Image (tube, rainbow, N blue to C red):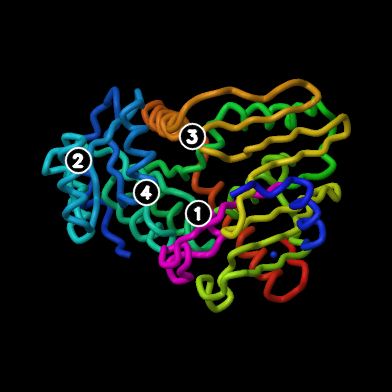
């Protein structure tokens, strides 16, 4: 599939611009001796765990693959053989809470459909484990707040799997913006999407947290927030659509466009889609533009600005390894997470506001 041109998408953007709660005291008897490397248990063994996180955990220095949680017995057998995982570190969803008694596992990484993120994050925290949770954090702001509260009460860290915050090209354009090396930001255009040919995945099921805005849309929202270096104050306009109603049923969003307003009247036009391959971030500043394309790919980001090329190269799955090593080191050093739960909550608040703007046809203040 040929990637949609930036000019065409920007034109479109401009024109279109919306538990189980267990007692923590019952779990904290597990030894918390200081370790050189933290043991990580992956919950959910779909594509992201199988193809990216597990290989990345073979490269990490501060953490390692210690256990798994899966509802598929055949996967448990295959992973046990491939990664030499002890039987005692293999769990299914019914006995998951017994992980509280396993000193090998320090971190539970929740890699499930969004509708399950809150439950397993809270159960992990109540089991005395640190929590890493994939994006989107949850399906609404209330669930995000409950996850943050559970980790805080249990004195456990919570990090959201926003790999780009750990990524050097992202950090470079953010440095340029923060230091105003090109002056103030005037406008941002960001798009993230791909052609999803599946018809029965959780991303096509509303009840499981499906719809493109929760998934790829978070990248576009992040592009607007990181590209401006500010938080939006209003959703000016938004619209959802689909060209495949037989797959994206009952109004579920295959494509979303929205216009976000930031302090000082700075505007960001965003687009996200499961119907086309789009991936770029354009940041117009007073003294020139930063252009990132791809903006959020696994294999490395590339960009340019009047200050020079932005292109720190690396191989898949370096981003995931860097993210997990950074987060593990923060835990071991008792330092704040680079991407705490509050960051995921901010994006979900914006997601909800975009949906509201799209359904009402009105602007929504944040």
Q: Which residue is mark 3?
A: 336
| Crowding at mark 2 (Cα within 10 Å: few <14, some 14-19, many 20+) | some
* CA gap, disc 2 and disc 1: 30 Å
Closer-to-camera residue (342/210): 210
* Residue interval drawn in magenta: 190-215
Q: Which marked residue is nearer to the observer: mark 1 or mark 4? A: 4
Q: Position of residue 361 (x, y in %)?
A: 75, 74
Q: Which residue is mark 4?
A: 47
Left/right placement of residue 339 relative to residue 102 reads: right
Instruction: Determine if residue 116 is in view.
Output: yes
Could you tell me if the residues under marks 3 and 1 are in contact, i.e. CB atoms within 8 Å?
A: no
> Could you say whether the residue bearing mark 4 is in a helix, strand or loop?
helix
Closer-to-camera residue (90/140): 90
In the image, farthest residue toward the front: 1
In terms of sequence position, does the residue under pointer 2 or pointer 3 come before the other? 2
| Crowding at mark 4 (Cα within 10 Å: few <14, some 14-19, many 20+) | few
Q: Which residue is mark 2?
A: 30
99 relative to 287, above or below: below
The residue at 51%/37% (across/down) is: 298
The residue at 58%/40% (across/down) is: 296
Could you tell me if the residues under marks 2 and 3 are in contact, i.e. CB atoms within 8 Å?
A: no
Q: Which marked residue is nearer to the observer: mark 2 or mark 1? A: 1
């Amino acid at each position: 599939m040929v990637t949609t041109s930036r000019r065409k998408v920007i034109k479109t953007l401009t024109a279109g611009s919306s538990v189980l709660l267990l007692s923590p005291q019952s779990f904290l008897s597990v030894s918390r001796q200081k370790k050189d490397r933290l043991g990580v248990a992956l919950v959910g063994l779909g594509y992201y765990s199988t193809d990216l996180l597990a290989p990345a955990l073979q490269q990490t220095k501060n953490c390692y693959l210690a256990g798994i949680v899966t509802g598929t017995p055949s996967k448990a057998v295959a992973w046990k053989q491939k990664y030499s995982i002890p039987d005692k570190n293999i769990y299914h969803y019914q006995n998951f809470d017994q992980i509280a008694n396993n000193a090998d596992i320090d971190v539970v990484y929740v890699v499930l459909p969004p509708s399950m993120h809150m439950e397993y994050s809270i159960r992990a925290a109540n089991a005395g484990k640190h929590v890493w949770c994939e994006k989107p954090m949850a399906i609404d702001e209330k669930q995000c707040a409950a996850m943050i509260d559970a980790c805080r009460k249990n004195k456990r860290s919570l990090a959201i799997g926003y790999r780009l915050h750990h990524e050097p090209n992202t950090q470079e354009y953010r440095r340029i913006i923060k230091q105003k090396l090109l002056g103030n930001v005037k406008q941002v255009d960001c798009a993230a999407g791909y052609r999803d040919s599946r018809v029965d995945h959780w991303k096509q099921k509303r009840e499981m947290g499906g719809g493109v805005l929760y998934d790829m849309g978070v990248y576009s929202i992040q592009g607007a927030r990181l590209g401006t270096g500010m938080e939006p104050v209003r959703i000016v306009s938004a619209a959802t659509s689909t060209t495949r109603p037989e797959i994206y049923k009952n109004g579920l969003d295959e494509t979303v466009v929205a216009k976000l307003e930031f302090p000082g009247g700075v505007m960001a036009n965003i687009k996200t889609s499961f119907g086309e391959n789009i991936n770029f971030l354009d940041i117009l500043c007073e003294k020139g533009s930063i252009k990132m394309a791809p903006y959020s790919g696994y294999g490395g980001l590339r960009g340019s600005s009047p200050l020079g090329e932005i292109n720190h190269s690396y191989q898949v799955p370096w981003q995931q390894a860097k993210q997990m090593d950074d987060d593990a080191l923060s835990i071991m050093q008792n330092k704040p997470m680079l991407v705490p739960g509050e960051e995921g909550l901010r994006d979900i608040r914006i997601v909800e506001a975009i949906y509201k703007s799209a359904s009402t046809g009105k602007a929504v203040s944040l």
